[in-house]
Amino acid sequence: MKPQQFVVIGLGRFGSSLALELMEMGYEVLGIDHIEERVEEMGEQLTHAVMADATDEGIMRSLGVRNFDCGIVAIGDNMERSILAAILLKELGVKQVVAKAISILHGRALSKLGVDRVIFPERDMGVRVAHQLVTPHLLDYIEISKDYKIVELTVPACMDGKSLAALNTRAKYGCSIIAINRESGIIVAPTALDDLHENDIIVVIGSNESIDRFENETV
Ligand code: ADP
């Protein structure tokens, strides 16, 4: 079942932005931070915000943290406290525990403790921005495996008015356009007769090489 209730530990830049986005999406969020001002800043905007030390087992129990579907440890200023908070969430029985790592070793320690998902926001954002800088039409991408990815690109002027048959991406580059997103709506699994307009967003799937070849045409 989809998680509905989230507890976010550490209301720094990452934790607060994640907590606010979850609220925006309509979920319940308990925010915890041991700094009073952070809690006050977020208090109005979250379902609940509590000033507490997330490494204190008694307090975490009394807050009923075990009833939450997902716990996110967003402590980035102290590795020891991040690890202790993650252990506590696991021990208290939170179903899904996600933690932010600040180094590879920190990430490895969190994984070994059984954290379900370890994220490296700064590293991942750096990689993402690097890709976007060299491919101006790239909006986003997902790595499906080491060799395959899905990318979201804006359609450049040179492809305006061209049908998918004319572009012939599968034969020419080895990748497929699986969706076209434009103001009037989204076309999922477009046919050869659908054509592209400048600034449409296309979703393309294929091997890294095939997509790189296609992206070079969009520059
Ligand atoms: P960012 O880089 O995302 O801004 P920070 O590392 O600066 O993240 O922020 C981490 C937050 O976690 C801080 O607001 C800090 O007060 C909070 N924090 C650190 N340790 C604990 C703890 N033991 N219990 C609760 N909150 C904590």
Image (cartoon, rainbow, N blue to C red):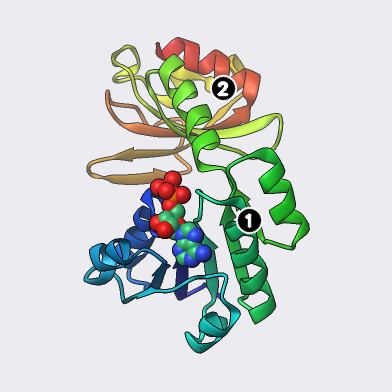
Q: Nearer the viewer, mark 2 or mark 1?
A: 1
Examine the image and state in which quarter residue 132 appears. Answer: top left
Q: CA distance from mark 2 to mark 1?
A: 42 Å
Q: Where on the picture, by quarter, is residue 5?
A: bottom left
What amino acid is found at the position of numbered circle 2 in the picture? Ile
Question: 68 or 176, which is in the foreground?
Answer: 68
Q: Is residue 32 above or below residue 11?
A: below
Q: Is residue 197 left or right of residue 218?
A: left
Residue drawn 57% across the image and 84% down it: 58
Q: Which residue is mark 1?
A: 80
Task: Please say whether residue 126 is visible from this viewpoint.
Answer: yes
The residue sitting at 23% across, 44% down in the picture is 184
Along the line of sight, the residue nearer the viewer: 214 or 24: 24
Label 1 lies in ligand 1 vicinity (Cβ under 8 Å): no
* Residue 12 position in % (x across, y down): 38, 53
Residue 151, compared with residue 219, is above or below; it is below
Quadrant (top left/top right/bottom left/bottom right) for the C terminus: top left
In the rendered image, the vertical position of residue 171 relative to residue 30, given as above or below? above
Amino acid type at circle 1 is: Glu
User: Dot 2, how many residues are within 10 Å of its Cα: few (below 14), some (14-19), or many (20+)?
Assistant: many
Q: Earlier in the sequence, mark 2 or mark 1?
A: 1
Q: Residue at the right extreme?
A: 112
Q: Which residue is mark 2?
A: 211
Q: x%, y% of residue 153?
A: 41, 28
